[in-house]
Amino acid sequence: MEISATLVLLVLLTLFTFLQNVANGFDSCPHTYTINPFKYRVPENQPYRTSYHFQPPQNWMNDPNGPMYYKGVYHLFYQHNPNAATFGDGIVWGHSVSYDLINWIHLNNAIEPSESYDIISCWSGSATILLDGKPIIMYTGIDHNRHQVQNLAMPKNLSDPFLREWVKHTHNPVITPTDEVAEVDNFRDPSTAWHGKDGKWRIIIGAQKGDEGRTILYQSEDFVNWKLDPIPFYATDNTGVCECPDFYPVSINGTNGVDTSVESLSVRHVAKVGYLRMAHDYYFVGKYLSDEERFIADAKFTGTCLDLRYDYGKFYASKSFFDYAKNRRILWGWVNESDSERDDIQKGWAGVQSIPRQVWLDNKSMNRLVQWPIEEVENLRSKNMSINGEKLVGGSILEVSGITASQADIEVLFELPELEDNAESLDLSGVDPQLLCSNAARSGIIGPFGLLALASKDLREHTAISFRVYKTSNKYVGLMCSDQSRSSLRSDLDKTTYGTFFDVDSNLRTISLRSLIDHSIIESFGEGGRVCISSRVYPSLATASDAHLYVFNNGTTSVIISKLNAWCIKEAEIGHLKNMSYKTC
Ligand code: DQQ
């Protein structure tokens, strides 16, 4: 009897520990910690500082670097100027860690200029988890000649759960540019490596040769000695330099991610490049021919609105990683400021990171991606209000009250009227959705309808995230817009209007929208994440508790708010560590 009671207790204890480990992402040791209440070191009065989007304590931030998951801890590295709120020489790898990708602990810089091969700056790169489980970083150093060379850095102490210190490899630089493939000052941003069936590692590096944008492939058996493949892995004419290339497999079934090295019939591949000239990240879905070391994209780059972008607003230098803890692929992007450099200096900071997004292949089309804010952001949701089945007649506006409209998460499903009789005709040839959005915001038949975010009570300030539905020769298309033109009474701001098309399913007759609002950023996900637009806005009236949120319909036909849920979002814990304790385990 006693033995079986002990046994039951033991089983229960094991189950409890297992569940605790699941909750902790299999972190080797449970932890508690407190963040220093002095969260950031910037001047008082910060109406535009974000509350749940990642920002360093002060100064300039651009590209997300690394990111990786290692033994229960997520690491975000980022391009950072520790000395100013502007870009310049002396860029370092800032470093923060997290247990949930939302609350962050700032650490000391991971990589700083120190050697001739990175003395001017330490630019972007990626982390790879090697076969023995150890992480390694490859980054671009701007050397004493201002040439771009690739270097390695490894954690100094693998038993430090935060991997606070990084040491540079004695063989650095491990890759230098060769004239025949790249210009010496346009050869940067090594990708996460993938491991081929032949036992060799592969990476791609962004480059330019003439006016061709290229990603160049290198192979290595030991991660230190790299062999150039002289034929570009993927190239586009007349685009200028490719920055921050990313290459990864996506599963053809379901939303789970797969490790970067997976090659099988159940995956397709995605190549992403940032073109500096356009300042946009474009992605291509296609086939990875590993035997020939080539990537064949389904569609060629056209330089038109037909090209696929992660985000049709501000979102650049993005980087993805495979999250082993939750079997998902996560994507980050840098969302830069739309105010002036003078404003940034005054604020004491510039640049935010997007909310990490889970990314997967759209199983409907099989040729584009879906992105959705990681589920952890929902832990910040607090007070909620909802609207169900309410008709929004043409020309009407309805306030979504009772939530903090400057810090919110809104999900809404609109039901459309009959399309055949109501949708306006549009000839898609040569139409630029971004231009159309500048005019389409006024009035139509089905739409524009959507949200007015960060709006002042008198509506003199607002950002409209809207939809309008058109009939083309063979299908119905939606136009999604984010119109910043009336976002602020302030001048000297970039108020460009963004827009993109998407297909509307005439059987479903619904359009969904989710917007994450955080003081000066609005990240919007249309059609369940098939089309995304992020914008930066700086209202002068609609700040903090003076910000309002509305649903509107400027079309002449009614749409129905099938379901709307809006939540206040709590502030994320982002700061320096005050203290931390590990329970004995
Ligand atoms: N930012 C880095 C470069 C990269 C560019 C410099 C993209 O490595 O090409 O901070 O924003």
Image: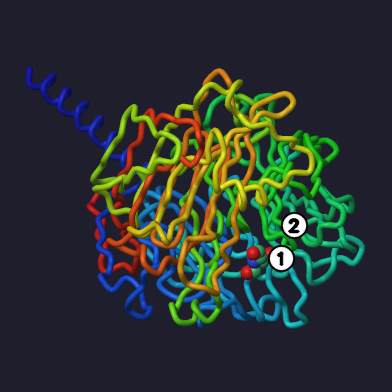
Compared across the picture, whether 477 is left or right of 403 comes to right
Residue 205: which numbered mark, if any?
A: 2
Q: Position of residue 172 (x, y in %)?
A: 70, 70
Compared across the picture, whether 85 is left or right of 21 comes to right
Say above or below: 552 vs 414.
below
Q: Position of residue 490 (x, y in %)?
A: 47, 72
Q: Position of residue 156 (x, y in %)?
A: 50, 66
Whole-Å distance between the Cαs marked 1 and 2? 9 Å
Q: Which residue is at the front of the view, 247 or 378?
A: 378
Residue 358: which numbered mark, if any?
A: none
Compared across the picture, whether 583 is left or right of 279 comes to left
**For numbered disc 2, what is the local secondary structure?**
strand
Inspect this view and state whether residue 321 appears: no
Say above or below: 372 vs 190.
above
Q: Which residue is at the front of the view, 529 or 288?
A: 529
Badge 2: residue crowd in 10 Å (few <14, some 14–19, many ≥20)? many
Residue occupying the point 55% across, 67% down: 338
Query: Mark 2 and mark 1 in contact (Cβ < 8 Å)?
Result: yes
Say above or below: 368 vs 536.
above
Q: By what rule are the colours in the image chosen?
A: rainbow
Residue occupying the point 52% across, 21% down: 508
**Residue type at mark 1?**
Gln
Indicate which disc, 1 or 2, sits on the residue closer to the N terminus.
Answer: 1
Asked if ligand 1 lies within 8 A of label 2, the reply is: no
Say above or below: 272 vs 80.
above
